[in-house]
Amino acid sequence: MELSGSEIIIQFLKDEGVKHIFGYPGGAVLHIYDALQKQTDVEHILVRHEQGASHAADGYARATGKPGVCLVTSGPGATNAITGIATAYMDSIPLVVITGQVPSHVIGQDAFQEVDAVGISRPCVKHNFLVKDLKKLAETLKKAFYVATTGRPGPVVVDIPKDITAPHIKIPYEYPARVEMRSYNPNFNGHPRQIKRAVELMLGAKRPMVYTGGGVIMDNASQELREFVRKLGFPITQTLMGLGAFPGTDPQFIGMLGMHGTYEANMAMHECDVLICIGARFDDRITGVTSKFCPYAQIIHVDIDPASISKTINADIPIVGGARQVLSEMIKQIDKTDASVDQAALDNWWKTIKAWQKQDSFAYEKKAGLIQPQEAVEELYRVTKGEAYITSDVGQHQMYAAQFYPFDEPRRWINSGGLGTMGFGLPAAMGVKLAFPDKDVACVTGEGSIQMCLQELSTCLQYDLHVKIINLNNRYLGMVRQWQEFFYEKRYSHVYMDSLPDFVKLAEAYGHVGIQVDNPDDLHDAMQEAFKLKDRTVFLDIITDQEANVYPMISAGKAHNEMDISPLQQARQAALREKGELV
Amino acid sequence: MRHIISLLVENEAGALSRISGLFSARGYNIESLTVATTEDQTLSRMTIITTGSDRIIEQITKQLNKLIDVVKLQDFTEGNFIEREMMFVKVKAEGDSQRGEVKRLSDIFRARIIDVTDTTFCIELTGSGDKLDAYIRAMHENNIIEVVRSGSMGILRGEKALTL
């Protein structure tokens, strides 16, 4: 089969099983777009800004586990996509981003819409390629998918000069089913002796703790994790990226940990004697100050990326391997060994944890006539029966969503954890809705974040992507305001969102349904109506308490046992102490 | 502590910038970096001299290994290895006494004079970094016109080798 470069790209995507790509045309990719419109196997979603393309592909990848694919033009097309690429890089999401480039003979001459896409993207991709030879195009694309999806996944950029895609130059094409790269061998199996040592250590624990992250979800290891944790009866906490791998409503799950995690999860981290970390990387939002991190614990760390092990926190038993394989081996080893869990010690440990749980650290005060952001998320949970795909932007609403919407399944909670990219939520929700058109998809956002990729409302209309936008509107950049309240004596600097648009009219202008609600009594009906309108995109603008704060909170330089708790919880803690129910 | 790390990398455009970019992005030190192709035209051999605590050096080697273009890597520091650096020095050499002194000093260091004019010598010297430093110190500062150093290269002693 003789094909042009453009036809090779499209045929390759087809052969690779790619159904959807997100993109935006421009001069350098005109040939590719011409080839694209001559076929129907690969559906192209025209976003309204290239940042939306990379976020949408990212959301698609997180929800499905398949690589997300973008196609953008050279210069500004490539630079606009960078924020989404960096977002995917920080959260290890498989993306393949095809960027057009100016023709080979003018590269380096500051041609129109020329940018060094390989150079600009280098620090935020797993790898990138510049295609210099048409004969290597198919093989390079295969390498891009291979690198993006294996080992610790990540985004890969393929920069393709316009002359490579010229329609009149055709060469024989065959789908490269396999590639080998001598410098890249991503298949690590956990070392059997290390796994054996780890199982010995955890069975000897008096106060064990399981801490898992996005790696478990990436590696589709939720079933193995559930079996492992239930077999041992240990408490488990998860990072923001790991939520859903173990059911959020299971009694063994003691909540998210870290800066805005539960009191009990953070206290248990501090007091545990054996910490089993699987597919997480001891991020600074998780550890608090590292010098006081888990002072009594021996640490087992399982990760596919050797560079993640002992990067910030030293591992006593490092295991380099995929979460699924290592968990399966650990389960086998537990079954095989004569040793068993120290049940008496474990019962005691659970008693301590249950006492911490009495604190109910997420508790908040409801106020008549004023919607608390927490109750809006709780209502969302009720109306969607906890089964929706939830994307979020970045800020207070993101933390409320993580705290008040327990996920029982993996890949349902989609947010920018590492880079913290405002503007992520709406395009990511489009990607999810495209993958699962029959499921409820909601974007929990704020009036600050939503305005960063607002233009994608137009894409939602064009492609019938009926997502529900849950806008927690407090007229403040809430998380920044919270920090200014706590650490800058309430000197609110540039955090008030003045001159806000009328979001209801705005939604209508884009052809959608807009609903505003400002009273707790109307919240249920409004939420229900939003989800009843199955074939409409709904913008639910929820006017919330302006100065609500996210609690508990570990401030900079503090340890897990030095959380700040809300005034309500302080009173509750004092009462429990008096009754002798708190240790 | 000072470490000497030797790498085999794909001989491709961009490989060098990935490696130097890693050092600048993560705030690691580079004392010197040398690179050239090997007998296999698809591979480049690189020697990096860096300093850092054990933890930082461990991170550097892991992060380097993670780069797709890095084929193989070894930290020579713990093992038995040879390290050499090459230097060109151009010095003033005017009048018999000065020319004689530079010649004598170069002989002591087993340096070679590789270019001569009426007023200058160009000297080539190979050795450890310390030896090169010592030569520069021994030469009167006022005499030195220019110094060009290659940065260190390393190779393992004995039968061991860093090859594919």
Image: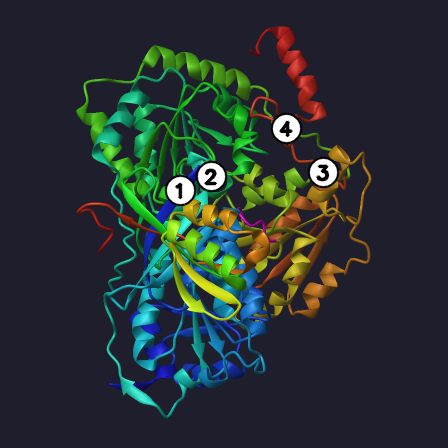
Distance from disc 2 to disc 4, alpha carbons, whole Å, reads 47 Å
Quadrant into which the C terminus of chain A falls? top right
What chain letter is assigned to the residue under label 2? B
CB under 8 Å between discs 2 and 1: yes
Q: Which residues are magenta?
A: A417-421
Look at the image and tell me whether residue A75 can be seen.
yes
Measured from the top left, where is residue B116 in percent x and y? 45, 69
Measured from the top left, where is residue A306 in percent x and y? 36, 42
How crowded is the residue under tag 1: few (<14 C-alpha within 10 Å), some, or many (20+)?
Answer: some
Name the kind of residue labelled 1 in the image: His
Q: Which residue is mark 2?
A: B52
- Mark before the other along the chain sequence, 2 or 1: 1
Q: Which residue is mark 1?
A: B3
Residue A389 on the magenta span: no
Residue sitting at x 20%, y 46%:
B160
Name the kind of residue labelled 4 in the image: Ala
Instruction: Determine the main secondary structure of the stretch shown in magenta.
Output: loop
CB under 8 Å between discs 3 and 1: no
CB under 8 Å between discs 1 and 4: no
CB under 8 Å between discs 2 and 3: no
Are the residues under badges 4 and 3 in a single subunit?
yes
Residue most toward the front?
Answer: B96
Name the kind of residue labelled 3 in the image: Trp
How crowded is the residue under tag 4: few (<14 C-alpha within 10 Å), some, or many (20+)?
Answer: some
Q: Which residue is mark 3?
A: A483
How crowded is the residue under tag 2: few (<14 C-alpha within 10 Å), some, or many (20+)?
Answer: some
Are the residues under badges 2 and 1 in a single subunit?
yes
Measured from the top left, where is residue A506 in percent x and y? 72, 65
